[in-house]
Every structure is written in C-alpha cells, then in structure tokens.
Image (cartoon, rainbow, N blue to C red):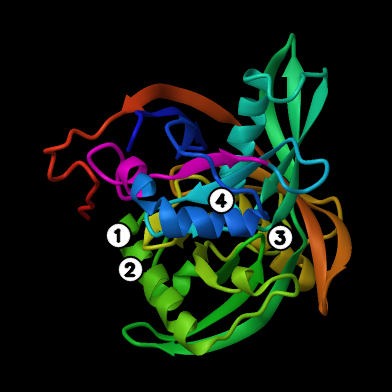
C-alpha cells in the first residue's frame, strides 16, 4: 500500500458491500475481464486487506469501480469476496444504483433514473426510484439467464441421492430443495445449510462441466442455492439461502441467484412472463423478481429477469497497514 484505502460501506438486504473510493493504483485499459485478471494477478493483496480480518470478515463483499469499456456504460465494477472475484452480483448492483445517484456519477431524474453498470458478465441496467432528488428502491434487468441442466441427480456422500438443477443468472448456481438434506428454514442451523450446500457445490464442480456461450471465463460453478421447494408460482414468498465462493453465506436473497431461480422456474413452466415472485433470504430480507422477456443465449432458451430491492449506507472508513503489523495483510478465521 502506498496510500490509505478509503471505502463506503452499504448493505442490501443485510448483505454487505464495501465500495472502494480510494487507495487503489490505476488499472490498465482493456476489457472488463482483462481488468479483472490484472487486479487478480497484481493487486490481490488489496482484496485481502479489505475483505479479510481485522478490517473485514469471512462473509465480507466488495466492489471496485473501474473505467467502463462497453459503450453506454455509466460505470464498471469488479466484485470481490473471500475467494476472489465474481462475475455478477445483484445485491451490489442494487447498492451501486443508489450510490451512483447519491455521488453524482449519474444525474438524477425523477421518478426513475437509469444507471448502466458494466459487470464482468456484461451490461446490467439498473432503474433507480428518485423522489425529491433522493434515490430509493432499485431494480435491475439481468443479463441473459438460462437453465443449463435441469432435473439432474447425484449420489452425495453423507446425504444420499440429491436432485438438482444448474442455472445461470450472471453466475452459475446449483439449485436444490433443502428438504432433501433434512433441512427446514426457521428450524435448522445455518451451519447445516452451509455444509450441505458446500458439499453439493464441490461434488458438482468435479462431476459437471459447464460452458457459457459468450466466454469460457464465465463457465464455473459459483455456489449452491438451497430452497424451500416452493418453485411453482404462488403469492407467498419463497425462501432460499445462497452459499457461494469459499462457503460464504449471502444475507440477501442473492440478485444473481434469484435470476437463476427465475430462469429455472420459467424453463419448467412454473412461472409465466410478468408474474412477480417474492424471494426471502436466510436473514428475512426480500427481493422481488419477475421474468421480463424470453430470449436466446447461444443454444439456450433464456430469459431477462427483473430483480428489485433496497440498499442502505452503514459507514465510511479509511484503512491503513502499519509496517510491523504481522496480521495487517489480512487473515480469516471460521
């Protein structure tokens, strides 16, 4: 570090977002994936300082704003977490939509302001409600999302035969009914959900090769979403928990995860165009979600989803590392 790292902290549905506002060196020009590779290969020590203890924690999440490359993008973002750098993050998009208005990165227009955000998975269009010049609720239209593999099953050691889907919503997720693992929302421990989801993720990483029609770097399993099994359309909320990266737990319903669930639901005729569902997280926070339109993504029948929520500020900070601080570069305990 040559300068202090400054951040603004927000949360969306309880899920943190640490937005870097200063302290990073310039990022070379290039595509968003090239920028992500550069930050991963040359500046990863800064991710550890920001995400890990003693300044962060195991489940911290961050956003680094970089120069946009796509025409029409208002800003571009690299997402970071305990394992590395992800391709899409819906809760971050919701927070960044509000942040862009509040910081004057995009001029506020009532009653709705569009913020075009370039993410590693592509351009994500956020719509920010504006009242009396202040930003409020945010929704976004997803990148093309699709069911990659439906109605699959695997013998999972310790759990038996588990049925699952794999769907893409900006990142690839395995989707499985938590009741197969003997788990019930409101009754079972979060630790048990995490162990079950992690076991499924690791098994499928070994067993199921993935591909994405746009770029090979997008073709990796980001995590597992365990649901309450209420996939068919209903006016009642459906609950889920998303366990991603290195067993990190999302406190929100997960924007890209909701998108993936909607893609799977639509492919299975469990939800129709324009039908709105409410998705509830392990912490009790809620996102809205609906299928806006049906499209194609390479060989896949795909959708564009709309996902909405609220983000709030939680603080500002300036971080330093003293030269003789043996733990200052970051560590994790679980």
Mark sitting on residue 262: 3
Determine whether 280 is above or below 295 in the image. Answer: above
Q: What residue would you read off at disc 2?
A: 195
Q: Are marks 3 and 4 in contact (CB under 8 Å)?
A: no
Q: How many marks?
A: 4
- Residue at the image point whose x is 67% and y is 58% from the top: 121
Of labels 4 and 2, earlier in sequence is: 2
Q: What residue would you read off at disc 1?
A: 191
Q: Which residues are magenta?
A: 48-67
Quarter containing the N terminus:
top left
For discs 3 and 4, the disc positioned in front in the rendered view: 4
Mark sitting on residue 254: 4
Determine whether 260 is above or below 136 in the image. Answer: below
Determine whether 33 is above or below 312 in the image. Answer: below
Q: CA distance from mark 3 to mark 4?
A: 12 Å
- Structural crowding at the residue carrying mark 3, measured as other residues with C-alpha within 10 Å and reported as few (<14), some (14–19) or many (≥20): many
Determine whether 308 is above or below 79 in the image. Answer: above
Q: Nearer the viewer, residue 229 or 332?
A: 332
Q: CA distance from mark 2 to mark 3?
A: 25 Å
Q: Are marks 1 and 2 in contact (CB under 8 Å)?
A: yes
- Structural crowding at the residue carrying mark 4, measured as other residues with C-alpha within 10 Å and reported as few (<14), some (14–19) or many (≥20): many
- Residue at the image point whose x is 41% and y is 22% from the top: 315
Q: Position of residue 26 (x, y in %)?
A: 52, 40
Q: Position of residue 330 (x, y in %)?
A: 24, 47
* Secondary-structure class at tag 2: helix
Of labels 4 and 1, earlier in sequence is: 1
Of labels 3 and 4, earlier in sequence is: 4
Q: Are marks 1 and 3 in contact (CB under 8 Å)?
A: no
Q: Is residue 279 left or right of residue 300?
A: left
- Residue at the image point whose x is 61% and y is 63% from the top: 171
Q: CA distance from mark 1 to mark 3?
A: 26 Å
Answer whether residue 59 is magenta in the image: yes
């Amino acid at each position: 570090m040559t300068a202090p790292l400054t951040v603004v902290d927000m949360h969306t549905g309880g899920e943190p977002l640490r937005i870097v506002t200063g302290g990073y060196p310039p990022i070379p020009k290039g595509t968003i994936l090239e920028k992500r590779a550069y930050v991963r290969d040359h500046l990863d020590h800064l991710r550890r300082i920001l995400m890990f203890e003693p300044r962060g924690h195991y489940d911290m999440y961050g956003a680094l704003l970089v120069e946009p490359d796509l025409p029409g993008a208002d800003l571009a973002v690299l997402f970071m977490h305990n394992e590395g750098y992800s391709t899409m993050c819906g809760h971050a998009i919701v927070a960044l939509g509000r942040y862009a208005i509040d910081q004057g990165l995009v001029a506020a227009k009532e009653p709705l302001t569009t913020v075009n955000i370039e993410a590693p998975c592509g351009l994500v269009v956020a719509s920010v409600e504006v009242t009396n010049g202040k930003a409020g609720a945010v929704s976004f239209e997803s990148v093309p999302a699709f069911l990659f593999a439906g109605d699959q099953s695997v013998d999972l050691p310790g759990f038996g035969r588990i049925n699952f889907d794999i769907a893409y919503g900006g990142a690839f997720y395995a989707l499985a009914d938590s009741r197969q693992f003997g788990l019930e929302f409101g009754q079972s421990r979060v630790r048990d959900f995490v162990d079950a989801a992690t076991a499924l993720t690791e098994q499928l990483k070994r067993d199921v090769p993935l591909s994405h029609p746009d770029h090979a770097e997008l073709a990796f399993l980001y995590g597992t979403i365990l649901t309450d099994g209420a996939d068919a359309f209903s006016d009642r909320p459906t609950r889920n928990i998303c366990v991603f990266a290195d067993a990190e737990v999302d406190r929100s319903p997960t924007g890209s995860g909701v998108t993936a669930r909607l893609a799977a639901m639509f492919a299975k005729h469990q939800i129709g165009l324009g039908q709105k569902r409410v998705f509830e997280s392990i912490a009790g926070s809620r996102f809205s979600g609906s299928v806006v339109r049906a499209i194609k993504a390479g060989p896949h029948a795909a959708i564009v989803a709309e996902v909405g929520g609220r983000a709030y500020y939680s603080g500002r900070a300036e971080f330093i590392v003293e030269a003789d601080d043996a733990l200052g570069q970051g560590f994790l305990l679980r």
